[in-house]
Image: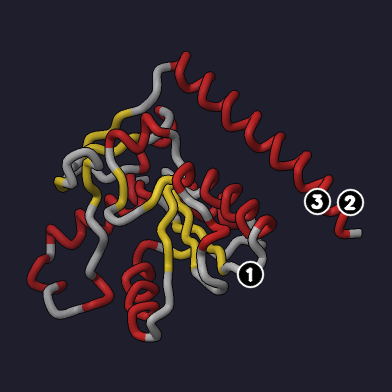
Amino acid sequence: MDREEHCEEFVSKIESMFPDVPMIRTNEMANVIKDHEKDNSRYVLVDVRSQPEQNVSVLEGSVPLSQLDATKLPAKTHLITYCTIGFRACLEARQLKEEHPDLRVSCLDGIACYTHAISKNKQNPDDNNDSDSTKLLNIVQPSTGQVTNQVHTYNERWEKTVSEDFESLNFSSFMFTMQNFLFGAKMAKYTIANKFRNLFRG
């Protein structure tokens, strides 16, 4: 199994775990952006990963979840969450929809999947020049805005989901444990908040 197939296997499993969260595949993203531009509607690409991951690279034009104020967005704004390979993005998308039912919320398959699409475009530039559907967002280093080939994959298991044209970085065992603890605590807080919200709705 090559890296792209490995990536797709993970994404497909994650997608099946979250049937209530619409997932946008990387090869669909350009058309999603084009559709929003055509009807003059707004979308916001939301990076739900931790700050250390974002410090390595982000999808160009994305907003960190920590800086998102969804209460100030117009109704029907399309929020598109992303992480490495979709799992955290789906969880955060579900929570955003719970908190902001007037917004449209989806998740992207992940920055790992994006690396494969970018590699394909580089390998076949002549085939892609005239096609809007193949125009992709760049992966950039946020402090400089420069295109980069480094991607943080969160853990070693997901390292092999990234294209070989990219350099994979990941957390040490200790930092991985800490990040899992912090994310788990955050999800537990969401669960409690949702239970209270649903109680008062009833």
In the foreground, 50 or 111? 50
Placement of 184 over or under 72, stated as above or below = above
In the rendered image, which quarter contains the N terminus? top left
Q: Quadrant of residue 198?
A: bottom right
**Type of the residue with mark 3:** Arg
Disc 2 versus disc 1: distance between alpha carbons?
Answer: 20 Å
Q: Are marks 2 and 3 in contact (CB under 8 Å)?
A: yes
Placement of 63 over or under 172, stated as above or below = below
**Type of the residue with mark 1:** Asp
Residue name at image x 42 percent, y 32 percent = 154
Q: Which mark is residue 199?
A: 2
Disc 1 versus disc 3: distance between alpha carbons?
Answer: 16 Å
Residue 19's x, y, as percent? 65, 61
Q: In terms of secondary structure, where does tag 3 sit?
A: helix
In the picture of the structure, the residue carrying the numbered disc 3 is 197
Disc 2 versus disc 3: distance between alpha carbons?
Answer: 5 Å
Q: Residues within 10 Å of mark 3 (few under 14, many from 20)?
A: few
In the picture of the structure, the residue carrying the numbered disc 1 is 102
Q: Is residue 131 visible?
A: yes
